[in-house]
Image: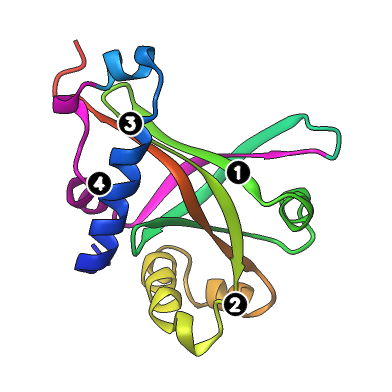
Amino acid sequence: MHERPADLVELQRTIDDSFENAGSHLREIATPERRPTAAEIADRLTGMRLLVLATTTRDGRPINGPVDGIFYRGRFHFGSSPQSLRARHLRERPAVSATHLPDESFAVTVHGDAEFIDIHADEHAEFKQTVLDIYLPVYGAEWADMLDGGAWYARINPRRMFTFAMSDPS
């Protein structure tokens, strides 16, 4: 877990505000006892967590696809190639939605704006090290070369975040 106390306070506020303004159907499903706290979310989302990320085309059509999500300092981060369709969409329209849904007993959905970050900047050194700690053991040193070769990262600044956890899905 990489979150600091202030990150958890901000994340909890986002989750609470999101449910306060949610529709009745969602509140009936994600009852208070099924809403993990910010600390529980941060603890559960360590390492790489697959996300389905949705962007939009110029004419407003949604397009979604999988990305490697890294939950760091209370926000999802993801990367891609600068030449990807996803990157073009985000340069023009930063609004995104992303969901981590490993099974029916746990879900995190975030709606917000993607902000490109310079992973090589000093201010992001801790995040870059987190990324390296996740990927180097799996893919080897060549992966660091790819990162240095132009891959970009973005973080999702959440407007809304909905969480759900159930210990026994049956």
The vertical placement of 113 against 140, above or below, is above
Question: Residue 24: horizontal and vertical position, in percent?
Answer: 36, 14
Dividing the picture into quadrants, the one containing residue 2 is: bottom left
Task: Classify the position of the N terminus by image quarter.
Answer: bottom left
Name the kind of residue labelled 2 in the image.
Asp
Secondary structure beneath dot 3 equals helix
- What residue would you read off at disc 3? 19
Give the residue at x 42% y 74%.
Answer: 127
Label 3 to label 2, Cα distance in Å?
32 Å
42 part of magenta stretch: yes
Could you say which is closer to the camera, residue 138 or residue 86? 86
Name the kind of residue labelled 3 in the image.
Phe
Give the residue at x 45% y 76%.
Answer: 128
Task: Classify the position of the C terminus by image quarter.
Answer: top left
Circles 2 and 4, Cβ within 8 Å, touching? The answer is no
Label 4 to label 3, Cα distance in Å?
15 Å
Dividing the picture into quadrants, the one containing residue 143 is: bottom right
Give the residue at x 32% y 31%.
Answer: 20
In the image, which residues are magenta? 31-57
Label ID, residue 121 = none
- What residue would you read off at disc 4? 41
Q: Tell me if residue 109 can be seen.
A: yes
Q: Earlier in the sequence, mark 3 or mark 2?
A: 3
Name the kind of residue labelled 1 in the image.
Val
Question: Residue 96: horizontal and vertical position, in percent?
Answer: 60, 43
- What residue would you read off at disc 1? 96
Secondary structure beneath dot 4 equals helix
- What residue would you read off at disc 2? 118
Disc 3 vs disc 2: which is toward the camera?
Answer: 3
Task: Give left or right: position of 144 versus 35.
Answer: right
